[in-house]
Structure formats: structure tokens, C-alpha cells
Amino acid sequence: MSERKRNPQQSIRAHCLWCMGGSSQLVRECLDESCALYRLRGPKSDEAERVCLRTIRRHCLACTVGDRQAIRACPEKECVLRPYRFGVHPRTIKRRRKRQVEKNHLMLPGM
């Protein structure tokens, strides 16, 4: 897989391609309806980004057998779904952390 930036839908597609050995024909013919990514595996989808993120989260929970701490400490550096494993876009996580740091600076009136 290339190291380029992908949106959640593209990451799902890339993961399905990886799972099927790089064959887009096999992805189209996939019959594993129990997979959380099954509905979103196609190249084009009108699904909202939030649905894709929640689906990736569900897939990661299945991968770690429901262990939420294992998702945080996920050792799979090569997984294309890894940036979205928390069910939130990485930009949102960065913004939240930035706001938390800003809140720690207490400004007293009159100083």
C-alpha cells in the first residue's frame, strides 16, 4: 500500500483490496456479509463519512475481540484503517487535544 493520505472510504476500499490479495474482482465477488466493511467495500459510495468511521471502529473492535485498550495500543502499523480506529477523524482528535491544552492555561482577571 502506498503511504498517501486516504479518506475513510478510500481506506475501507484499500483494506478490502488487501484482504482479497489485491484483486478488485474478488472484492466485488466477496460474500462475507458478516464483515463490518462489507457494505462500504465498493469504489463509490454515497455513505456519509460518519458512517464510514463508525464502521471502521466496529471492524477494529471485531479485530481485537472487543478489547478497547487493544485498539489504542494497536501494533499494526501497516493497516490502512489504523488512523480511523477510534471512530473519529484524526483532524478532530488533534483539534480536541489542542483545545484541552489551551484550557490548561488559566488567565486570572487583572493580570
Image: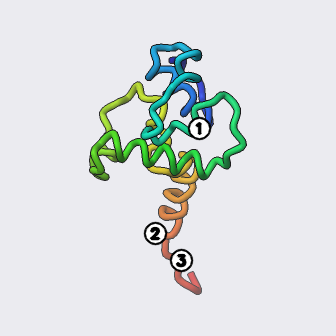
**Mark 1 or mark 3, which is nearer to you?**
1
Frontmost residue, 36 versus 49: 36
**Mark 2 or mark 3, which is nearer to you?**
2
Q: Position of residue 36 (x, y in %)?
A: 47, 42
Q: Which residue is mark 1?
A: 40
Image: 82 above or below 106: above
Q: Earlier in the sequence, mark 1 or mark 3?
A: 1
Compared across the picture, whether 28 is left or right of 37 comes to: right
Q: Which residue is mark 2?
A: 104
Q: Position of residue 84 (x, y in %)?
A: 49, 43
| Identity, as a three-letter code, of the amino acid under mark 1 | Leu
> Element under label 1?
helix
> Element under label 2?
loop
Q: Are marks 1 and 3 in contact (CB under 8 Å)?
A: no
Instruction: Give the Cα separation between the discs numbered 2 and 1.
Output: 40 Å
Q: Are marks 2 and 3 in contact (CB under 8 Å)?
A: no
